Structures are given as structure tokens and as C-alpha cells.
Amino acid sequence: MPKEDLEDKEKLYLHLATWAMGMPTRHEIQHFVEALIAGAKSASKDFVRHVSALGFEDYANIQWLSLQVEGHPLGDYMLWLYKSLLAYLLHNHPEVLAQQKKLDSMAFDRFTPSQVAPSPQLAEIYRYALAEPGVEEVGPHPRAADGSLEPFLPAGRPVLQGPEPRRACGY
């Protein structure tokens, strides 16, 4: 709130009334944000540990066992896999889950008036949620030597396949 607005009693009372309307909700949102920050720090450490634990053989196995047949590029697949891991680690953090449940049970009983538009940060977060990062113009497959192959158009991610399950009878 700008200082000059504090001098105008009507504006000051309007702001105080608006803030008071949402006070319990504001606290719950703050707790949710604090849990997200703590969860992101924890997830970051776990993420680095997981990523660092994979060796050359893991990358080779993923490429050979899951991606080879379809020709899916390894880098694209690994970024998707790591993005999924990071989201899982954050979302599965106990504090984040507890605060999510509290936020899920909240309802804004009435509209909270505001004299400001939604923030540019909110628009940016929505943009990130709706757009795939790193998308470039359609071109040849990354492993095409002469560029003569059809373009790579990812329609989904292959699932890592393991060996056939063993049967109890041995065949």
C-alpha cells in the first residue's frame, strides 16, 4: 500500500476492512506457501541425489530398452522423466500434502474486493503450466544424419519396459 494512501482515511479503512475479511484464509494460504518453500528445498536435495545416482548404464538401458524401437530422443525423454520426478518429490512432501488438504477444504464464502488486477506472476505461472518448455520449430529427428527423415513429433512418452514376468511353472 503506498504511503499516500495511508493518509486518506477512507482508503485506509477500505483496505483494513478488506484485509480483515480474509484474515483466516490469508493465514492458511501463507502456511501453504511456507510448506511449498520447505518442500521445494527438500525436493531439490532429493532430486539431485536421484539424478546423481544414475549412471551411464541407466541412460543406455533406457534408450535401448524403451526408446530404440520408436526412435524417441533420449534427452527429451529424460527431461520428461526428471520433470515428473521433481513434481512427485514436491507433491509428496508431508507438509505440502497436509497444507494441500487444508487448502482443499477452504472456500471463499464471498468475493474479496481488490483494487488491483491479478499479478503478472499469476499470468506467468499459468503460462508455464500451459506451455511445454523448450519447444522449437518442427525439424528433422535429432539423430537424422542428413535431415532426410521425417520430423520428430512427440505424441507421448514411451513407458520404460522391463523383462517379461517369470512364470511359476518355468515357461
Image: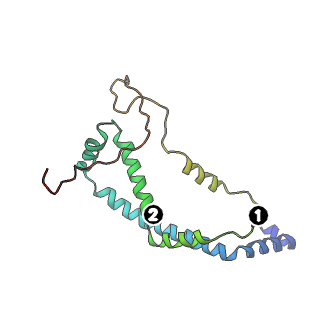
Q: Secondary structure at mark 2?
A: helix
**Image position of 69 (left or right of 2):** left
In the displayed structure, 44 sits above or below 82; it is below
Nearer to me, 98 or 8: 98
What amino acid is at disc 2? Leu
Residue 31: which quarter of the image?
bottom right
Quadrant for the N terminus, please.
Answer: bottom right
In the displayed structure, 148 sits above or below 94; it is above
Density class for disc 2 (Cα within 10 Å; few <14, some 14-19, many ≥20) is many
Q: Which residue is mark 2?
A: 90
Nearer to me, 36 or 161: 161
Q: Secondary structure at mark 1?
A: loop
Disc sitting over residue 114 in the figure: 1
Type of colouring: rainbow
Question: Looking at the picture, how far across and down is residue 129, in whole percent?
Answer: 55, 51
Question: Looking at the picture, how far across and down is residue 79, in whole percent?
Answer: 40, 48
In the displayed structure, 139 sits above or below 89; it is above
Q: Residue at x 66, y 73 (%)?
A: 25
Q: Residue at x 69, y 69 (%)?
A: 108
Density class for disc 1 (Cα within 10 Å; few <14, some 14-19, many ≥20) is few
Looking at the image, do the residues carrying marks 1 and 2 touch, with CB atoms under 8 Å apart? no
What amino acid is at disc 1? Ser
Query: Reading the chain from its start, which is encountered first: label 1 or label 2?
Result: 2
Q: Residue at x 77, y 65 (%)?
A: 113
Question: Looking at the picture, how far across and down is residue 152, in whole percent?
Answer: 41, 33
